Amino acid sequence: MSLACTIHAALDLRLDQETPRALGAHDVLLRLGAGGICGSDLHYYKEGRVGAFVVREPLVPGHEASGIVDTVGSAVTRVKPGDRVAINPSHPCGRCDYCRAGRGNLCRHMFFLGSASVFPHAQGMFRERFVLGESQLTTITEPDISLGEIACAEPLSIGLHAIHRAGPVMGETVLVTGGGTIGCMSVMAARLAGAAHVIVCDINDRALEMARTVGADRMIRSDRAKPEDLADIADVSIEAAGSPAALATCLTATRRGGRIVQVGTLPPEVTFPANSVMARELDYRGAFRAHQAFDWAVQAIRTRRVDVRPLISAQLPLGQAKEAFALALDRTKSTKVQLTCE
């Protein structure tokens, strides 16, 4: 039997016992290394849903994780017992029109771990042991790269994909709204892509200080800023807060002819200011999950081209999942909280 953190409904998080499924020929039994609690995991916990994805059966959350190989199937060649691995939570079909066009993150038949986007749900990785196909695993051989760092590959891939969707940012000013994990990952991604100046807006001092730590040049308390402080200050804006107020900041801050990339999940009732987009000739783009950016993220972490360690606020054992979720909900105390095997 194996311990699993399971969300049964809003504010109903339990520790259940389960038996991992049997191994197929290309399957691998993994032990959890570290699993980061993401904003979407918090939405499932607080509200029982993320946007249109509603919890309809018990859901094991967790889609950003590292693992240690326990046992391998008879045909597995990529990993061996004892290997430490990065885990790609995306499993696109590889056959639909979007996959064939190189946009697997938009796959019509996506199986994304820890998600209620399909039914039965795609169970995630907040559990002691779980089985995945070997194609989703990348071995990490660098001994100085921790399991916690490896688990940050998925959120880093979101930031990388957001900047990729923004287009070339070399020499430009990039604004990021939200200094949480994804906002900070977007800061690092913008730096990798050659942005000349990176600004971060947030309403939380700790988040702004964390953004400074990972490379932001200027921090703005958006709830205290005057309109003239925000007007026309960025060529590109990344909305990483999932807040209507943050979206309004992006629309004010982005120069005419600039680009806005929405990464955060906005509430369904948000009013979209289409006339501002029209009159200012703004390009408004979405960035949903990631595709090849996961491999870029793994490489950036394993070579320490980016250092994600400052973002890891705490690691708690799986048996303290409720305490870990409570800590993750407190932005005054944490950025990235991770669960580990006991």
Image (spheres, rainbow, N blue to C red):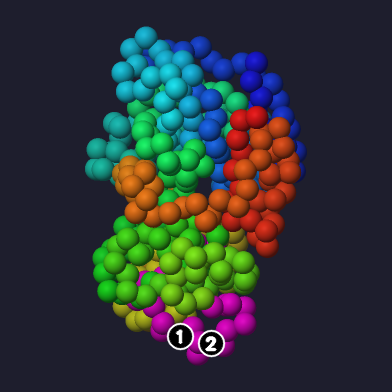
Residue 79 in sight in this render:
yes
Callout 2 amino acid: Pro
Report the side of 40 relative to 215 (left or right): right
Callout 1 amino acid: Ala
Element assignment for label 2: helix
Residues 339 and 42: in front is 339
The residue that mark 2 highlights is 227
Q: Are marks 1 and 2 in contact (CB under 8 Å)?
A: yes
The residue that mark 1 highlights is 231
Residue beneath the point at 27% across and 74% down:
171
Q: Residues within 10 Å of mark 1 (few under 14, many from 20)?
A: some
Element assignment for label 1: loop
Question: Up-down: is 236 above or below 322?
Answer: below
Question: Up-down: is 224 above or below 325?
Answer: below
User: Does the segment drawn in magenta span residue 224?
Assistant: yes
Q: Which residues are magenta?
A: 220-241
